[in-house]
Amino acid sequence: MREFIYYSRHAPTTGNFGKDLMKAGRLDIAMHVVIAAFFLSHKLREDTKLHLIFAGQPDPPKHIEIFPVTEGKTDIDKIYLSKKDIAGLIKRMLYKYKPEKKSEVFPGYWIEKKGFLDVVKELKKQGKDIFILDKKGQDIREVEIGEDAVFVLGDHDGIPGKELKRLKKSCTPVSIGKKTYFASHTVAIVHNELDRREEVSRVV
Ligand SMILES: C[S@@+](CC[C@H](N)C(=O)[O-])C[C@H]1O[C@@H](n2cnc3c(N)ncnc32)[C@H](O)[C@@H]1O
């Protein structure tokens, strides 16, 4: 399983946001990250979990966890994840948030009140290797990456300095090159790197 944690300092924490996603704490970036995390051409990835951490107003923080169910009957066992309406899905999830509990709003879609570093800590406790996507990190092509790896990335503002410093004490910073990529491109490039490694190990 691959996991990504996307942190956004200004993404809204209730469903009460307007249609202009760029003005809604740059939700447009989060939507592109969802697409990059799950969509292949004509297929959804079944090996990926995405954590969205929204820390904007009015009720931060929110942890949205997405590991879509892909088997079974639509609207009974699973929901149809449409590229065209990811904002609507996130809106419904934020509206259905219930205090003091992690709720499964749709099959494979959870929401709870939990902050960025607590989510990282929890995955670390489960024995996962955590990598921070950071331009200044070690070249990803030279890094050994196990099966249950987690990659942390930020929005247009990046990961805040204080959090980044704390993460660097226990997580490995990895770089995908010297250019600064969009958050969603970063996810696609990491997927490609891991897909290529899997292809090579299948042949050997
Ligand atoms: C648009 S970038 C953020 C730019 C922001 N000004 C900064 O300096 O962090 C969004 C996220 O993509 C990831 N990213 C972008 N370029 C990268 C690179 N070359 N290597 C690793 N991660 C990268 C980082 O996690 C970053 O927080």
Image: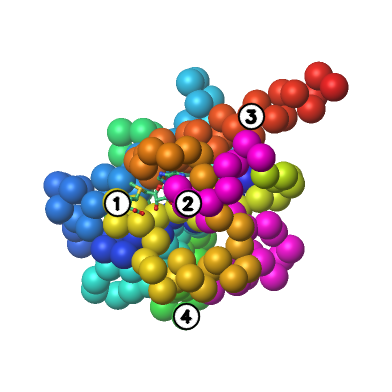
- Magenta region: which residues? 118-142
**Residue 146 place in picture, x, y as percent:** 74, 46
Name the residue carrying label 4.
100
Q: Is residue 166 magenta?
A: no
Disc number lying in front (1 or 2): 2
Query: Image height check: is 97 above or below 176?
Result: below
Name the residue carrying label 2.
136
Cα separation, mark 3 vs mark 2, equals: 23 Å
Q: Quadrant of the N terminus?
A: top right
- Residue at image position (69%, 70%) is 125
Name the residue carrying label 3.
195
Image-quadrant location for residue 8: bottom left
Cα separation, mark 4 vs mark 1, equals: 30 Å
- Indicate left or right for 196 with 18 as reference: right
Mark before the other along the chain sequence, 3 or 2: 2
Cα separation, mark 1 vs mark 2, equals: 16 Å
Helix, strand or loop at disc 2?
Answer: strand
In the depicted view, which residue is nearer to us: 199 or 177? 177
- Whether residues under marks 4 and 3 lie with C-beta atoms below 8 angstroms apart, the answer is no
- Residue at image position (26%, 63%) is 10
- Identify which amino acid the numbered label 4 is placed on: Glu
- Identify which amino acid the numbered label 1 is placed on: His
- Identify which amino acid the numbered label 2 is placed on: Lys
Mark 1 within 8 Å of ligand 1, using the beta carbon:
yes
Mark before the other along the chain sequence, 4 or 2: 4
